[in-house]
Amino acid sequence: MLAFDTHKAVKALQEAGANEHLAEAVVETVGAAMGENMATKADMTEVRTELAGVKADVTEVRTELAGVKAELKADIAEVRTELAEVKAELKADIAEVRTELAEVKAELKADIAEVRTELNEVKADITEVRTELAEVKADIAGVGAELKADRADIWAELKADRAEFRAELKADRAEFRAELKAGRAESQANLADLEARLYRHLWIMAVSIVGLTVALIKLLD
């Protein structure tokens, strides 16, 4: 009995176009038949028939593969055509985007240049304002110094005026007191004179009354 190499048989069937499962099934069937030592003519005929069926299946598979290949080629050609159209559209879109980007860049450059000019103007204004602030600070410092000097002068004048006012007030007070004393003494003298005159008049009246009384008494007698 000859040795049967199943691996070679399966490989040969696959090279002939059979799929893996079909090749393994055929090899298994043939191996089983040979292993049982039943290789009769009828069996050989059956095997040949099965092999013919396998070849028919392989032919059918090849036909299907050819159809699939044709369909794949058609699909690939269609996809390539679509890809070419997409590429063309993308190229047009890219060119348009590049044009728009160039325009945007130009506008941005112009805007940036304008902003830089405005910034330079603002910087110049800030420098001018700082200079004016420095001048104002210097003026304020000068005014402050003058105010301090004026305040010192005013305080000195106020102190002098207050001392002078106090001296004048003290002198006026002393003079007023002196005048008040003199007036009081004069008033006292005038009061004494008035009292003397009053007493004199009263004395005269009393004498007159006494005289009249005496005269009336004499008349009544």
Image (cartoon, rainbow, N blue to C red):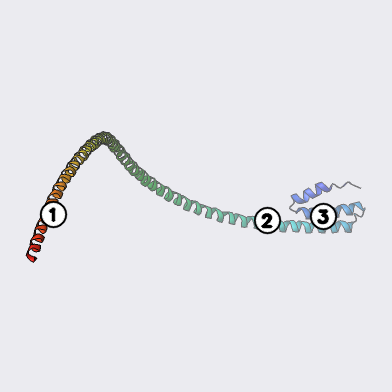
Viewer-nearest of labels 3 and 1? Answer: 1
Q: Amino acid at mark 2?
A: Leu
**Residue 77 at what x, y percent from top left?**
56, 54
In the image, is 197 to the left or to the right of 35?
Answer: left
Label 3 and label 2: CA atoms lie apart by: 21 Å
**Residue 177 at what x, y percent from top left?**
21, 41
Q: For this rendering, which residue is in front, 82 or 197?
A: 197
The residue that mark 2 highlights is: 65
Q: Secondary structure at mark 1?
A: helix
Q: For this rendering, which residue is in front, 209 or 200?
A: 209
**Residue 87 at what x, y percent from top left?**
50, 51
In the image, is 14 to the left or to the right of 106?
Answer: right
How many numbered marks are there? Answer: 3
Q: Amino acid at mark 3?
A: Val
Give the crowd class for mark 2: few <14, some 14-19, many >=20 residues within 10 Å. some
The residue that mark 3 highlights is: 26
The residue that mark 1 highlights is: 202
Q: Residue at x 80, y 50 (%)?
A: 10
Label 2 and label 1: CA atoms lie apart by: 178 Å
Label 3 and label 1: CA atoms lie apart by: 189 Å
Contact? badges 2 and 1 (CB < 8 Å): no
Viewer-nearest of labels 2 and 1? Answer: 1
Q: Residue at x 82, y 56 (%)?
A: 48
Q: Secondary structure at mark 2?
A: helix
* Residue 71's disc number: none
Q: Amino acid at mark 1?
A: Leu
Q: For this rendering, which residue is in front, 195 or 122?
A: 195
Give the crowd class for mark 3: few <14, some 14-19, many >=20 residues within 10 Å. many
In terms of sequence position, does the residue under pointer 3 or pointer 1 come before the other? 3
